[in-house]
Amino acid sequence: MMRPVISSARSLSRSVARQATRAFSTQQQQQQSRGQSSSSSSSSSSSKSRWAGVFGATLLFGATTTVALAADDQKVDYNAVRSAIANKLEKEGYDDGSYGPVLVRLAWHCAGTFDVKTGKWGSNAGLDVARDLLEPIKKAFPTISYADLYTLAGVVAIEEMGGPTIPWRPGRTDATDGTACPPDGNLPDASKEQNHLRNIFYRMGFDDRAIVALSGAHALGRCHTNRSGYDQPWTRAPTTFSNEYFRLLLEETWTPRKWKGPLQYTNSKSGSDLMMLPTDLSLIQDPAFKTWVDKYAKDQELFFNDFAKYFSQLLELGVKFPEPQKPKSLWNKLFG
Ligand code: HIF
């Protein structure tokens, strides 16, 4: 079944919030049913000092991260965090009226440095607008890790913009300092083509199908000359999650834009108001990639399902989630 897009995003988000609780661990579900609220988590001053040493600008989740999950984390009311994020999204005067796209980008940059061979890295935030937006939520819910907050914000943003429900669970930890940072160059370079994309995404453990599905997120947002050097949005509805990116890739004629900036492609026959990066265009230049572009352009439901699966995987790269606690035996309860 096709999902509704932006006009119904608000009501959709409510059902999304309900569905999302299913993705939480049994522990959290039990605890939510006990009615623990955000106020209980935000009042913990000891937890504030516990996290005071967190290295704010750079997060890591992955095998190298040694910080244990704070016991207080169990008290975070993730539905309240979701609502707080959702309430921050719309902003008249910022880009196309929503912080949603930049939050999606922050979420993926948190995870996109992962190396499947070494199990290392997995987070490199660097998006001031998005980080500043979320800081008050971190203050209101101090026991949530930055890595959980940033990834959850991307998930909520996608859902609020009419996209699929992304399975998400808490459990990411923040690095205590910058010594475990990944080297520069683990994130993709937009000026390159399919071999580079494969190098980057295979390193994370993904395949061609996943690369194409994930790329559909460029239906959202736009490029900013003052951030990346590139310019313009990919679609004409940059705050609506849809398969429009694939349709445009196939239906428009993409030619190199004549301008002083870096090489990007433009829809010169239909207004020159849209853009594709060299990495985007490689999806229709490479036959194996193009097979999936064709499929997703025709079938939005297939795209939504695949995207939800791969984006969820992306946000869990390198994360060691805590084992759900087994109920104690009678012997352990009495003598353990
Ligand atoms: Fe992006 N991406 N991304 N991206 N990205 C930009 C913006 C967004 C790449 C390059 C860029 C993914 C993969 C890749 C979003 C989401 C995702 C920009 C423009 C560039 C250059 C930044 C700016 O100027 O503000 C490359 C080369 C990628 C490898 C294919 C992910 C799959 C598509 C993983 C993904 O989810 C979003 C959303 C934006 C819009 C941000 C905004 O501020 O509007």
Image (tube, rainbow, N blue to C red):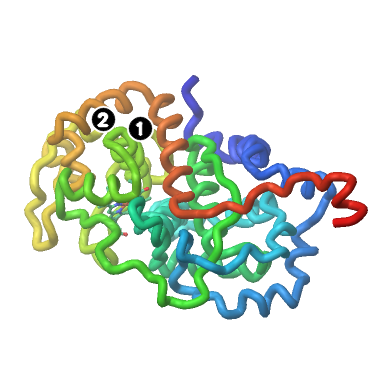
Where is residue 246 shown, x and y percent of the image?
28, 33
Which label belongs to residue 293? 2
Secondary structure beneath disc 2?
helix
Which label belongs to residue 183? none
In which quarter of the view is residue 310 placed?
top left
Residue kind at label 2, given as amino acid type: Val
Where is residue 121 shown, x and y percent of the image?
40, 61
Secondary structure beneath disc 1?
loop
Q: Is residue 79 above or below residue 3?
A: below
Structural crowding at the residue carrying mark 1, measured as other residues with C-alpha within 10 Å and reported as few (<14), some (14–19) or many (≥20): many
Q: Which residue is disc 1 drawn over?
A: 243
Q: Which of marks 2 and 1 precedes in the sequence?
A: 1
- The residue shown at (27%, 28%) is 292
- The residue shown at (53%, 43%) is 160
1 or 2: mark nearer the eye: 2
- The residue shown at (64%, 49%) is 323
- The residue shown at (18%, 50%) is 196
- In the picture, measured across the screen, residue 59 lies left or right of residue 279, that is right
**In 3D space, how far apart are the residues under numbered discs 1 and 2 (Cα atoms)?**
10 Å
Q: Is residue 238 above or below residue 261?
A: above
- In the picture, measured across the screen, residue 4 lies left or right of residue 79, that is left
Residue kind at label 1, given as amino acid type: Asn
Where is residue 72 shown, x and y percent of the image?
72, 64
Q: Quadrant of the C terminus?
A: bottom right
Can residue 273 be seen by looking at this rendering? no
